[in-house]
Amino acid sequence: MAAKIIKGTEVAKEIRQELKREVEELKSKHGVTPGLVTILVGEDPASVSYVTAKQRTAHDLGFYSVQDNQPADISEEALLDLIDKYNKDPKIHGILVQLPLPKHIDETRVLYAIDPKKDVDAFHPVNVGKLLIGEPDFLPCTPHGIWQLLIRSGAKIEGAEVVIVGRSNIVGKPMAAILMQKHPNANATVTVCHTKTKDLAFHTRRADILIVAAGRPKAITADMVKEGAVVIDVGVNRIGTTPEGKAILCGDVDFDAVKEKASMITPVPGGVGPMTITMLMYNTVKAAKLAAGIKD
Ligand code: GUN
């Protein structure tokens, strides 16, 4: 039987509606307006489109939102000064520096300069460490989005064999940390595979939940997937352009073949993608609540 398609676009919309109500309540009951600044250095077209989408969503949810564009030749010191300014600005609860940064800027130094309480990407080592010990303030946006997709689709996570393909700091590692926590919606047995894994298919075939962030188009074929598995595809590979100039996207999973074997699967596009920006908004609301001492 063909798999149920997990529609990230719809789950993202549902969470945004919840956030919108929460923002209205924060404003009316507490006089708090979540504030997000997105800092864009240079004019890389992909980064411009991501940042524009983040700003549009922040605006739609009723945030105080600031788009701060800086020239590609800004010095590292000037960028650090800018971050310091927003660290001290009480109207700003979340600071996002769009990556990648130009080569002359040390990305690590910039990310470490963001106040961990305003680090809505959750890339700062304080937030990475807090996640690992099971006391997170913020979860990184893409793995948090995947977690929400699993929970809201009714996937059984507790006790499941979860196999993650890819060990990046942004997806694979934090995804493993989230799903192995002692938490009723986690408590999974997690395996992380990577480019040096000896027999990838041996591991993926054991997975009840297979999460793929390998960065290779159609890296996962149907013979590598167990009957009835839940398959989450984080891949965004541009495999061509339409005559109108739009990118043609494909995931890391051979969707058409795997959907005949899986019980649930995310499409590309319209699966994990829409969740990432939504969880950034969630983190900004959470940062505003933490700053104001408001409990959930
Ligand atoms: N560039 C691509 N993805 C991301 C992200 O999640 N956060 C930031 N800051 N930059 C990115």
Image (cartoon, rainbow, N blue to C red):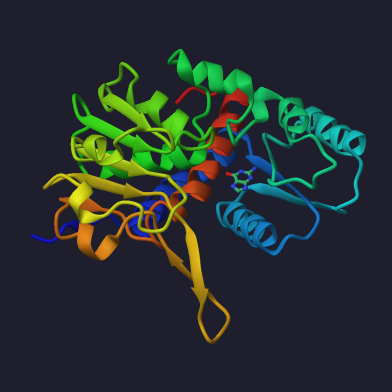
In the rendered view, does 142 fall on the left or right side of 76?
left
Q: Residue at x 81, y 34 (%)?
A: 83
Question: Where is residue 41 shown, x and y percent of the image?
Answer: 80, 50
Q: Quadrant of residue 147?
A: top left
Question: Residue 175 appears in which quarter of the rendering?
Answer: top left
Residue that lies at the very extreme toward the front in this rendered image? 198
Q: Is residue 158 left or right of residue 104?
A: left
The quadrant in which the C terminus is found is top left
Q: Residue at x 47, y 42 (%)?
A: 142
Report which quarter residue 48 is drawn in: bottom right
Image vertical order of residue 232 relative to residue 79, above or below: below
Q: What is the residue that sits farthest to the top in this orientation?
A: 133
Q: Nearer the viewer, residue 203 or 82?
A: 203
Q: Is residue 243 left or right of residue 9?
A: right
216 or 58: nearer the viewer: 216
View extreme (bottom): residue? 243
Q: Quadrant of ligand 1?
A: top right
Locate the N terminus by quadrant.
bottom left
* Residue 247 position in % (x across, y down): 53, 72
Please state if 269 lies on the left or on the right of 98 as rendered.
left
User: 216 or 179: nearer the eye?
Assistant: 216
In the rendered image, residue 269, in percent from the top left (x then y), is placed at 41, 63
179, above or below 42, in the image: above
The x, y position of residue 220, in whole percent, is 30, 51
In this rendered view, identify the residue nearer to me: 240 or 114: 240
Circle count: 0
Residue placed at 65% from the left, 61% from the top?
A: 46
